[in-house]
Image (tube, coloured by chain):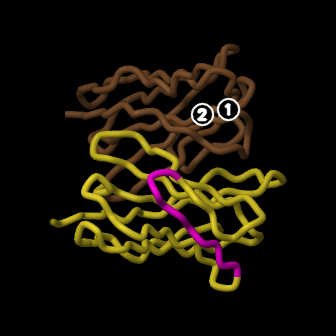
Amino acid sequence: KAGVTQTPRYLIKTRGQQVTLSCSPISGHRSVSWYQQTPGQGLQFLFEYFSETQRNKGNFPGRFSGRQFSNSRSEMNVSTLELGDSALYLCASSLSLRETQYFGPGTRLLVL
Amino acid sequence: AQSVTQPDIHITVSEGASLELRCNYSYGATPYLFWYVQSPGQGLQLLLKYFSGDTLVQGIKGFEAEFKRSQSSFNLRKPSVHWSDAAEYFCAVGPPLTGNTPLVFGKGTRLSVIA
């Protein structure tokens, strides 16, 4: 069974731009969570989706948003990029809420 | 609030030596507990998990972890480390099925392996 896939793997943007990251969960998984990983802050929870509904949201500004589609694929969007948004963005999928999460390889975003 | 502490930021061990990575958590009830490993530039790979039952859990790559409720700990162990084990290790806690809070991760412990 294929694992979690994330596209693109690498991205370079400039301040003020916006970006959309995509995550395809493991087949049959209905829950998708997003995390931001930086050397200073570690792994921080962004949001969690299940059945196209956001179930939890982390402590991030409104510039960070996401959605989940009927096929469980998810996207996250960051508008008005700031230098501090440079990070590895990880997506994880699970069969359902509170089930074991399996992570994708991440999208590394660099904001210049 | 839930929290996870990994006291050791960086550990260096010799190949073939034993390893123990510490994890302490703060949680209102007995949480679900996980250890993940991350190689440079990669995502997180699940090593093992504890939901209930036997407090000593076996994982992949020869790792095991022991849940100690009285100490709020979930330490990861391996009897003999291989050079390929060099990576960053993350402990995480999540709510049981009745909870509605996301996973909380520790800051990670970077493991270096020397010959």
Quarter-wise, where is residue A15 in the image?
top left
The chain shown in brown is which? A
Range of residues picked out in magenta: B60-69
Frontmost residue, B89 versus A19: B89
Name the residue that disc number 2 marks.
A93
Q: Residues within 10 Å of mark 2 (few under 14, many from 20)?
A: many
Badges 1 and 2: C-beta atoms under 8 Å apart?
yes
Name the residue that disc number 1 marks.
A31
Badge 1 marks a residue whose secondary structure is: strand
**Label annotation for residue B109:** none
The three-letter amino acid code for the residue at tag 2 is Ser
Image quadrant occupied by the N terminus of chain A:
top right
Chain letter for mark 1, please: A
Measured from the top left, where is residue B77 in percent x and y?
Answer: 47, 70
Between disc 1 and disc 2, whose residue precedes? 1
Measured from the top left, where is residue A98 in percent x and y?
Answer: 72, 46
Measured from the top left, where is residue A104 in percent x and y?
Answer: 46, 33
Measured from the top left, where is residue B86 in percent x and y?
Answer: 28, 57
Q: Residues within 10 Å of mark 1 (few under 14, many from 20)?
A: many
Chain letter for mark 2, please: A
The three-letter amino acid code for the residue at tag 1 is Ser
